[in-house]
Image: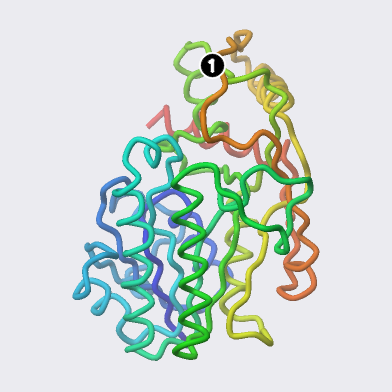
Amino acid sequence: MKDVLVTGGCGFIGTNLIEYLLEKTDLNINVLDNLSEGKLEYLEEIDNYSEDRIIFFEGDIRDEEDAERAIDGCDYVINLAAQTSVMDSIDDPERDAEINIMGTINLLEAGVREDVERFILASSAAPLGEQEMPIDEDKVPEPLAPYGASKLACEGYCSAYAGSFGLETVALRFSNVYGPKSWHKGSVVAKFIKQILKGETPVIYGDGGQTRDFIHTRDISQGLHLACVEDLNEDFELFQIATGEETSINELYSILERSLEEKGIDVPEPEYGDEREGEIYRNYADISKAEEKLNYSPAVPLEEGIEETIDWFLESYKR
């Protein structure tokens, strides 16, 4: 039986990943989280929570001692902990870099000292900036915001630690993640659902024609698990983890509207505001490399995933 460290394990993707790993694998799980956004109760409320298989460490990925004690004895590291807001990165680029870059370096250092088998970095499409679609691993990065620049640097350090220290590393560029347990998230799916359930009018920035590749947390979790266990030929690998499908924000709103109205919930017409600086207009991915080398296969259709997410929010409001 092997052990994995999940940083940011009390957050949105972290709790969904841990639920997936408990159900689909026999891995024991260490969790490192500073609880700045996630909460320990989010972790303890997952469906199949097991004190026998989960050890929680409160701490920061930038702290050497915190990283050392959490990673001790682990075979794999999945680094989800990060500053993920594009707008916050524009407001404070230094903080964004300190958390994302220095935190990742600190974990890589601990991974080398503890001789872990593989280090997995959660990245995003942000390093790429505006590109011809679909995006893939061979596109030349041109980040538009400090967040994208910091994630690109993290990918670079993963490659460097593979080349300099022999630490196997994998960087996964996630597309736009949505799903249950996204109560505290400001991403578009969660934000729109929360606003509508509160009787507020959602705002679409720009004309609504901007596109994203929306991926459910189960498909993200599948990709993260495969990145740990699949045989790979290179010490460093980079993969797009997405669905390969392009959906506009206007189309997304229509899907949300249909699902919510079927549940008897009134949905207002959205308002439209100015475009936001630093955001990409079109974004969807070619996932053929992940399909071929990771045996990755996204399985959750957008309409199904949206309905599941809405049901989770409705159930949460009842508590």
Image mark count: 1
Q: Above or below — where is 315 with respect to 48?
A: above
Q: Nearer the viewer, residue 86 or 299?
A: 86
Q: Position of residue 283 (x, y in %)?
A: 69, 42
Disc 1 packing (10 Å; few <14; some 14–19; many ≥20): many
Q: Quadrant of residue 139?
A: bottom right
Please give the name of the residue rendered at 42% of the width and 36% of the height, measured from the top-left corner.
183
Please give the name of the residue rendered at 58% of the width and 10% of the height, measured from the top-left corner.
271
Would you say 265 lies left or right of 134 here?
left
Q: Nearer the viewer, residue 128 or 22?
A: 128
Q: Position of residue 52 (x, y in %)?
A: 34, 75
User: Which element type, helix, strand or loop, lies under badge 1?
Assistant: loop
Q: Nearer the viewer, residue 167 or 44?
A: 167
Q: Above or below — where is 66 with respect to 314?
A: below
**Quadrant housing the C terminus:** top left
Q: Position of residue 218 (x, y in %)?
A: 61, 55
Q: Quadrant of residue 248?
A: top right
Q: Above or below — where is 146 with respect to 7?
A: above
Q: Position of residue 225 (x, y in %)?
A: 58, 71
Q: Above or below — where is 116 with respect to 261?
A: below
Would you say 156 lies left or right of 292 here?
left
Q: How is the image coloured?
A: rainbow
The residue that disc 1 covers is 202
Would you say 30 lies left or right of 232 here?
left
Please give the name of the residue rendered at 52% of the width and 17% of the height, measured from the top-left corner.
196
Q: Nearer the viewer, residue 124 or 241?
A: 124
Task: Give the amino acid at mark 1.
Answer: Pro
Please give the name of the residue rendered at 58% of the width and 46% of the height, measured from the top-left corner.
177
